[in-house]
Image (spheres, helix red, strand yellow):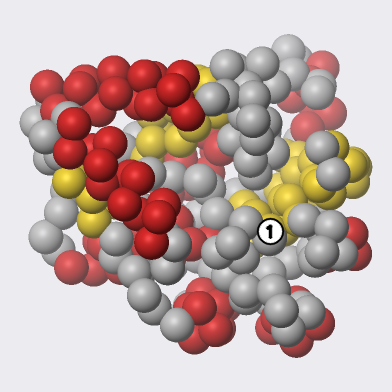
Amino acid sequence: MSWSGGKDSAFALRELLQTGEFDVVSLMTTVSEEYRRISHHGVREALLEEQARAIGIPLEKVYLPSGEPGGCTNDVYEAIMSRVMADYKARGVETVAFGDLFLEDLRAWREANLAKADMRGIFPIWKRNTTKVAHEVIQLGYKAYLSCVEPKVGSGFVGRLYDQEFLQLLPSEIDPCGENGEFHSFVFDGPIFRRPVSVRVGEIVTRDGRYYADLLPKDFVEKCMAGLIPPV
C-alpha cells in the first residue's frame, strides 16, 4: 500500500481490506532523507512509525534525497522507485494500492512506472465523489490533523482537526479531500487502528510558501531528552 499517513490513504486501506481479496504486506512511505519527515506532508518519521504500529501493518520507508517539492527530480524518484518495485516483485508482490481519487495524469504515471516492473496498481476509492468521501471519512471515525496547507486554503486551517466544522469553513473552491494538493493530513485514529496515536500540535511554520503544523508525540520532550527522536 502506497501510504502517505493521511486520510485518503487510510480510507483506501479500509476499502482494500474489506474486499478480502488482498494481503497487505506493508505500508510504503516516501520520507525525506535530510529532514526525516513524510514527503510533502511534513510529518515526523517518529509519528509515521508510531502510526504504523498502531495500525499493525509493517512500515517500509523509501528515503528520498529531499522530501520538498522540486528537491527530488522525477528521474531520481523513478530510479529509486524502480529499485523498490523490483525488490517487491522479487518478494512476490504483484500490486500496489493508492488512495488517489480523480487525477488522471497521476494515475497514468503511476501505472506506467509499475508496468516497467511488471506490476499493477489498484485504486480502491477511484472516482468516488470527494464531498461524500470527506463526510464518510469523518462519519467512520477517522481522526486527523491538517499537517500542511496551501496559502489559498488559509493559514488558519493548518493544525486543526479534519472534521465537520473544517468542511463547513473550507472555501468552496477547495476540494474537500484536498485532492489537488491543497492540504495534507495525518490520521491518528480510526477503524483501521488498533489504538490511537498520541499526538499534539506543535509550532506552526511557513516553508516554501506553505503552512506546516509540526505534529509531535505527546511525550516529545521526554523522547528527545532520551535521544529516541530528533528535536527538529
Q: Secondary structure at mark 1?
A: strand
Tell me the residue that label 1 is attached to. 183
Picture residue at 50% right of the left edge, 46% below the top: 4
Please say if 42 is above or below 45: below
In the picture, the quarter occupied by the N terminus is top left
Q: Nearer the viewer, residue 11 or 129?
A: 129
The C terminus: image quadrant: top right
Few, some or many residues within 10 Å of mark 1 (<14, 14–19, 20+): many
- Residue at 73%, 84% in the rendered image: 172
Residue 119, how many percent across, how many down? 15, 39
- Residue 110 relative to residue 186: left or right: left
Q: Residue furthest top?
A: 227
Instruction: State how many labels appear.
Output: 1
User: Amino acid type of disc 1?
Assistant: Phe
Q: Is residue 90 above or below residue 19?
A: above
Relative to 26, say whether 124 is above or below: below
Question: Which image quarter: residue 191?
Answer: bottom left
User: Can you give x and y, in whole percent of width and height, for residue 123 in the image?
Assistant: 29, 61
Residue 126 visible in the snapshot:
yes
Looking at the rendering, which quadrant does residue 14 occupy? bottom left
The front one of 114 and 163 is: 114
Q: Is residue 132 above or below residue 103?
A: below
User: Residue placed at 44% from the left, 56% from the top?
Assistant: 9
Q: Is residue 200 visible?
A: no
Front one among 62 and 140: 62
- Where is residue 121? Give x, y as percent: 23, 50
Q: Position of residue 210 (x, y in %)?
A: 81, 47
